[in-house]
Image (tube, rainbow, N blue to C red):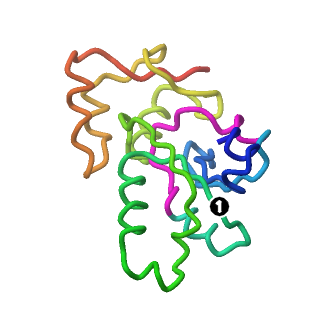
């Protein structure tokens, strides 16, 4: 997205930002130098499409979005609707960069488990493989209801989440 902003392909990008207590939030960025500060794994779904819908009501004309597969599909369906000819704003979508979606966990359940193991304020990031161990059985319970491909990622039964402190 940094390059797309610099080259003028887009004039704003919708990214996942970190809210309070690991609750993700959608954020719109128009400064190419600021994009890199949002590049990390969130492990919970960010309201990216909602932020895109807010951004289309601004002066931005060419908007890029970093999206999970389900978010990219939602944007594609919005673009395919005949209502868009009435100026619904989807015509401002200029670029979509798709991410691999493997860890769309429930924010409430993830933070509850992490609170049992450590102070959330001490966590600087999360990654795979684990340092602070959360068993894969726990992870499966945290997956969001519409997300079913996670089982293959956890087939080994080994712990998979690490919280960096």
**Whether residue 54 is situated above or below residue 66 in the rendered picture:** below
**In the displayed structure, does residue 61 sit left or right of residue 26?**
right
**Is 39 contained in the magenta span?**
yes
**Is 95 contained in the magenta span?**
no
Q: Nearer the viewer, residue 103 or 73?
A: 73
Residue displayed at 47% across by 32% down? 114
Q: Quadrant of residue 122?
A: top right
Q: Position of residue 117 (x, y in %)?
A: 47, 26
- Element under label 1? loop
Please rate how many residues cluster around mark 1, counting C-alpha atoms within 10 Å: few if below 14, some from 14 to 19, many from 20.
some
Quarter of the figure with the N terminus: top right
Q: Position of residue 135 (x, y in %)?
A: 31, 22
Residue displayed at 42% across by 23% down? 161
Please name the residue that numbered disc 1 is placed on: 62
**In the displayed structure, does residue 126 sit left or right of residue 147?**
right
Residue farthest toward the bottom in the current orientation of the protein: 86
Residue displayed at 59% across by 55% down? 26
Quarter of the figure with the C terminus: top right
Q: Nearer the viewer, residue 151 or 22?
A: 151
Magenta residues, as a range?
34-49
Q: Position of residue 84 (x, y in %)?
A: 45, 78
Q: How many marks?
A: 1
**Whether residue 117 is situated above or below residue 63 in the rendered picture:** above
Q: Position of residue 97 (x, y in %)?
A: 51, 43
**In the displayed structure, does residue 143 sit left or right of residue 90?**
left
Q: Quadrant of residue 110?
A: top left
Q: Quadrant of residue 12?
A: bottom right
Residue displayed at 49% across by 86% down? 86
**Whether residue 113 is situated above or below residue 154 in the rendered picture:** below
């Amino acid at each position: 997205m940094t390059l797309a902003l610099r080259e003028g392909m887009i004039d704003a990008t919708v990214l996942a930002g970190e809210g309070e207590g690991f609750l993700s939030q959608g954020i719109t960025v128009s400064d190419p130098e600021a994009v890199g500060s949002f590049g990390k794994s969130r492990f919970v779904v960010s309201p990216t499409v909602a932020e895109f819908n807010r951004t289309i009501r601004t002066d931005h004309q060419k908007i890029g979005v970093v999206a999970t597969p389900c978010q990219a599909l939602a944007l594609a369906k919005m673009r395919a609707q005949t209502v868009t000819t009435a100026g619904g704003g989807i015509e401002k979508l200029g670029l979509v960069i798709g991410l691999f979606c493997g860890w769309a966990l429930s924010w409430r359940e993830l933070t509850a488990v992490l609170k049992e193991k450590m102070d959330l304020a001490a966590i600087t990031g999360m990654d795979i493989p684990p340092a602070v161990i959360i068993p894969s059985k726990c992870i499966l319970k945290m997956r969001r209801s519409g997300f079913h491909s996670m089982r293959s990622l956890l087939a080994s039964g080994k712990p998979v989440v690490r919280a960096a402190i």
